[in-house]
Image (tube, rainbow, N blue to C red):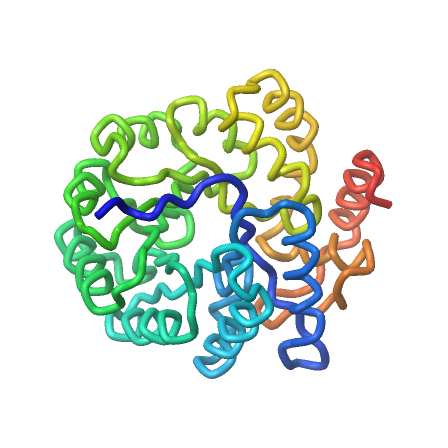
Amino acid sequence: MAKRVFQGSLVALVTPFRDGKVDEATLKELVEFQIKNGTDAIVPCGTTGESPTLDHDEHNRVVDIVVAAVNKRIPVVAGTGSNSTAEAISLTKHAKQAGADGALVVLPYYNKPTQKGLIEHCRAIADAGDLPMILYNIPGRTGVNMLPETVAQLADHPNIVGMKEATGNLEQMTQDIVLCGDKLSFLSGDDTLTLPLMAVGGRGIISVVANIVPKDVADMTHAFLNGDWKRARELHLKLFPLSQAMFIETNPIPVKTALAMTGKIREEFRLPLCPMTEANRKKLETALRAYGLL
């Protein structure tokens, strides 16, 4: 059976809070905003969704709300990763039960498994979770880098369909694609590298900046996939300064601040994340004004 292909613009959706709780009404509004603007899939409960500070009930509830709000109009790829294999399996099973179309599984953080441990971890989740699964390699946050040879060993698993690559290393990403060919759909984990990755065979992005400018991110990826490289490059260059501004402090602090500045959510984080410094807030405001968002 052919593997499911996730491509285009998948938004790493923020989790809005109000008075310390998940703001469910605003979460549904964000889903509508994304669908209306051409986003290809919604990814709740990733790092951008502040998954480390959602308890299990909240995590599952956010997935339930997003699946119900999307109502099969586009795919939902639920973040279900953990540094405990058993916990990741439990979250993935819930996502399947809720009706999600896929799972985004970040590699284990802090406990630093070997490459063999990574293979066993990912296979165990793919076997037990029984959902199309996108691996998520982000060594800057996890402290472990899944090497291309390891990715290639996982690429034959029927439930492992893609990889979100956030190493920032285009050479490694290219090596992934050389070794895996079309067995996996490679998606950028860095908004500034979407077009370069697509140029060597990537299929799109799991995007932070799409939270605020979903149409432009979707249009850029669609232009490239449709062979209009000139238009894709124009949009990439337009998006580039805004994408950079999303990372002047730890994600998702800038993107949530930008959403608050544009009236989409309340500016609220959970510790240890906290509001931006005044100097960075001014930089962010300048980037939003330059883009025409303020």
Q: What residue is shown at x 56% (from left), y 51% (from top)?
A: 11
Q: Nearer the viewer, residue 277 or 160?
A: 160
The residue that appears at 18% across and 58% down in the rendered structure is 123
Report the side of 202 relative to 157 (left or right): right
Q: Tell me if residue 199 comes above or below residue 93 in the rendering.
A: above
Q: Residue at x 42, y 40 (%)?
A: 187
How many labels sit on residues? 0
In the rendered image, which quarter is residue 28 located in?
bottom right
Q: In front here: 7 or 252? A: 7
Along the line of sight, the residue nearer the viewer: 200 or 40: 40
Question: In this rendering, is residue 139 above or below 80?
Answer: above
Percent x, y of residue 18: 71, 77
Relative to 58, is 250 above or below?
above
In the image, is 142 to the left or to the right of 245? left
Residue 287: x percent and y percent? 77, 38
Q: Is residue 181 visible?
A: yes
Q: Quadrant of the C terminus?
A: top right
Q: Residue 111's x, y, as percent?
A: 27, 63
Q: Is residue 254 visible?
A: no
**Residue in the image at 81% along x and 55% along y:** 261
Q: Position of residue 268 (x, y in %)?
A: 70, 69
